[in-house]
Amino acid sequence: MTILVCEDNIMTLKTIEFSLKKAGYEVFKARDGFQGIRILGEEKIDLVITDINMPYTKGLEIIRHINTQMEVKIPVIVISGITNEETRAHAMELGAQGYLTKPFDPKVMMDLVRTLSGKN
């Protein structure tokens, strides 16, 4: 299973990547939303984990892109420092299946990844 991680904070990106690779997932990384959308067009991605606030293209635009421009709907988990309920609700309305706030527990993230990937 391949997972695209869109995150501009290098420490958060490394934490997510470490947890995913340790569990046997293949990881593609994007440091901004524009790069994430490019990877979605080039690779077979099974799940996306994205931050909301990134350079060039925001995480909400990635969710919108997946649900309006792609034939296959890919599950999306948002991991963000934005804690307000309006942003969480908006992300879920756009099609995110999960929303974790930073700082997050990697175990909780992995439980959500396993649930969405059918590896429970």
Image (cartoon, helix red, strand yellow):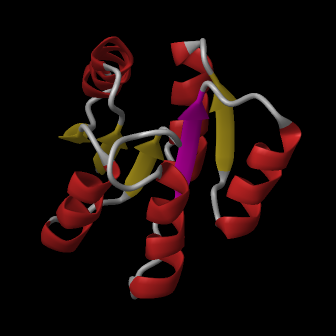
Q: Is residue 49 above or below residue 102?
A: below
Q: Position of residue 21 (x, y in %)?
A: 25, 25
Q: Position of residue 92 (x, y in %)?
A: 73, 57
Residue 101 lies in the magenta stretch: no
Residue located at (63% from left, 57% from top) = 96
Q: Is residue 18 above or below residue 98?
A: above
For this view, does 96 lie left or right of residue 84? left
- Magenta-highlighted residues: 75-80
Residue located at (55% from left, 45% from top) = 77
Most foreground residue, 6 or 44: 6
Can residue 120 be seen from the camera position used here? Answer: no
Residue 77 lies in the magenta stretch: yes
Q: Position of residue 47 (x, y in %)?
A: 41, 54
Q: Residue furthest right?
A: 85
Most foreground residue, 29 or 107: 29
Q: Is residue 81 above or below residue 72?
A: above
Residue located at (51% from left, 39% from top) = 113
Residue located at (76% from left, 28% from top) = 83
Q: Quadrant of the C terminus?
A: top right
Can residue 70 be seen from the camera position used here? Answer: yes
Most foreground residue, 106 or 89: 89
For this view, does 21 lie left or right of residue 84? left
- In which quarter of the view is residue 41 placed? bottom left
Magenta region, mostly helix, strand or loop? strand
- In which quarter of the view is residue 108 placed? top right
Q: Position of residue 76 (x, y in %)?
A: 53, 54
